[in-house]
Image: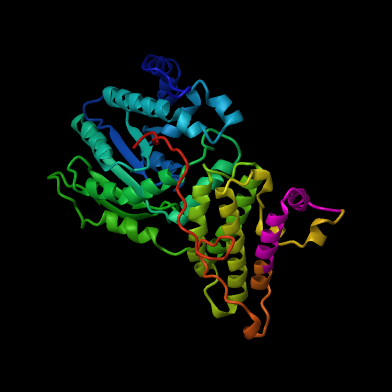
Amino acid sequence: MSPYRLEQEQLESIFRAEVRSYVFDGYTPSRAPDDTPVLVLLGAQPAAGKSRAQTAIIRENPDVVPLTGDRLRQFHSAYDDLMEQNPLEMPNATARASGAWVKMSIDHARDNRYSLLLEGTFRDPEMTMDTAREFAESGYRVHLVALAVNERVSRMDTVSRYLGPGDDTNRWTPATAHDLGYRMAPHTVRAAEDNPHVHRITITDRSGEDLFTNTRTPEGDWAGPTGAAETLLSVRERPLERDGAREWLVRRNEYTAALVERGEFGPVTRPTFEKLHTDAGTVADQAWPDPEDSRQRLRHRADQRFHGYLLDSSAEGTPSDLLPASPDVFSASDTRVAADRLDAGLERERDRRSKLSADRVGIENGVREEMRVLRGPSRDSARTPTAPEAGTEMGRTGQRQPDREDLQRDGPEPGL
């Protein structure tokens, strides 16, 4: 049994003493017979931008009570200690308590006729539709809102959210939790179109633009053509703009270095970076699409060689202080790394190289040489080796590596 488990009596006591007032204070329930409360079900994969979408929904429904499971984690008695000592463990440790408090808040809202904005990942169509039915049968109008956001963008933003300035949303999202929400959201939207208890459906994106909207008539039929799930799927696959794709590649390098330098690049975080490693091939094609971009594409392949080596080294159990942090610093010559005046990155790299075994030094020298060839190819094509394909998972040998086992543990996401 988890040392962080709270018993039901404790959960209920904390809800009555702290959570209920945190969620509902300042809001007025619907009391008049002609004042119909609203349930808004807002969903998308983690880090899709649901918090921003809340703002537009609240402008339209100022009396709606926003409920987000992540914000209830702070009421767990071990939350502060976890965030200080083991932030990567916090999501699993607090998931059961947060989920219980979400359920208690939902029941309190329905029983007292509060309009409610319930945020979730739409990972479970049946649970979402059960919630819609319960509220509709209690006299609520039910509005489902889904965000259409490219998975490569939201996956990157799960890392950004974790590394951002500390607040009660800055937690690690396991790769499986992100991907489950992304995969299941279209199924939840299709279920909503087929469910008579859902009265309105909207597909939007981070800009707040309504990409699809449909409302049921008083007779219960949809006023317009169906196709919400198809809109969601189509918009999510739109390619990144060129500048956005280039920024994505820069962020991948920066976030990788940050996790390595914090000593947090390992079994919990690595599966996300394995996904980002694969994503990078597609993003690079969008960042450098033209024939004159050939040098940038080669530089990207060199960076991919670095990331493949980093991922393989971590999977083999290499300690954090022996992992390289960034492709530019890793590819620096021994002379540059040994210079007297160093920035922090080069100083760390000098210290790291001093601890490597002779065998590891030889391996890394080979990887650096491959990267240098890719970054600065000879004009004589006969002397230029064939570069690995962008987007493949490249290990130390440059060959495609088998899929790695997802080693992280992930508890259930609170909410839908």
**Which residue in the rendered view is the most extreme toward the left?**
219
Q: Looking at the picture, how far across and down is residue 221, in whole percent?
A: 15, 49
Residue drawn at (43%, 19%) of the image = 6
- Split into 4 quadrants, where in the image is the C terminus? top left
Q: Position of residue 353 (x, y in %)?
A: 74, 52
Which residue of the protein is positioned furthest toward the front in this rendering? 359
Q: Position of residue 387 (x, y in %)?
A: 57, 73
Quadrant assignment, res 395: bottom right
Q: Residue at x 42, y 31 (%)?
A: 95
Looking at the rendering, the stretch of residues picked out in magenta corresponds to 341-369
Question: Which coloring applies here?
Answer: rainbow
Instruction: Pick whichever, 114 or 360, lies toward us.
Output: 360
Say left or right for 143 vs 340: left
Foreground of the two, 250 or 141: 250
Check if residue 303 falls in the magenta segment.
Answer: no
- Quarter occupied by the N terminus: top left
User: Is residue 55 shown left or right of residue 362?
Assistant: left
Query: In the displayed image of the protein, which residue is found farthest to the right?
Result: 340
Give the camera-side residue of 383 and 145.
383
- Left or right, 352 with reference to 406: right
Considering only vertical position in the picture, is 187 above or below 3?
below
